[in-house]
Image (spheres, rainbow, N blue to C red):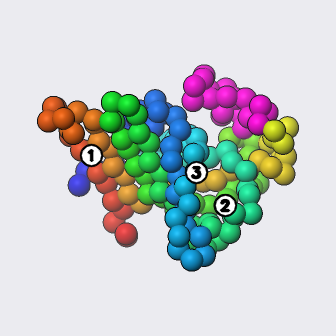
Amino acid sequence: MHALSEIAPPFIDLAHRIVWCTAATVDSQNRPRSRMLHPMWEWDGEKLTGRIATGPTPVKQAHLDHSPYMSLTYWTENQDTCTAEVKTEWALDEESRTDLWEWFKSTPMPLGYDPAIIPGWDDPMSPGFAVLKLTPWRLRVMPGSVLTGGSGEILSWKAGDH
């Protein structure tokens, strides 16, 4: 097991290089449901936080009301993968929405984009736009070279209270 300070930077590097991840939630009957999402991650030297610009759809809200946990997995053709198991929280206040909107807008592509390109997202306070805050409790980073017997190390971290 690694310290969060050892895994957070390589996790962000890989996640931001891949950009899109498969995100899984569970419904009220504990059946999984996956979707593609585009989180942005921040490491302040002590805490890793992710945020997703997303639509607060009735299905997504119902799933996260049932269980606020989500699994996010990134994969690329060379078999590099990273996974974040997270607790989610809706951040619907104006400051959170505006900050994330501007962060996406000011970040160069392919990670950044103008959120207004999404139908129904005219500005940060549009009803179809929301911020989902992510607090990881488990992380894993695996270089694809590990699968082929090459060099590399699997990095993993789990919060102490899980």
| Left or right of residue 134, residue 92 in this image | right
Lower sequence index among marks 3 and 1 = 3
Q: Which mark lies nearer to you, 1 or 2?
A: 2
Please state the horizontal and vertical placement of residue 24, each as a whole percent of the image.
Answer: 52, 57
Quickly name the residue at label 3.
Answer: 35
Quarter-wise, where is residue 45 in the image?
Answer: top left
Q: Is residue 113 magenta?
A: yes
Tell me the number on the disc at residue 117: none
Q: Which mark lies nearer to you, 2 or 3?
A: 3
Q: Residue at x 57, y 45 (%)?
A: 36
Q: Which mark lies nearer to you, 3 or 1?
A: 3
- Mark 3 nearby-residue class (10 Å; few <14, some 14–19, many ≥20): few
Q: Is residue 109 magenta?
A: yes
**Amino acid identity at mark 1:** Leu
**Amino acid identity at mark 3:** Arg
Quickly name the residue at label 2.
Answer: 60
Task: Tell me how far mark 1 sits from mark 2, CA to CA.
Answer: 30 Å
Tell me the number on the disc at residue 155: 1
**Amino acid identity at mark 2:** Lys
Residue range in magenta is 101-118
Task: Tell me how far mark 3 sits from mark 1, CA to CA.
Answer: 25 Å
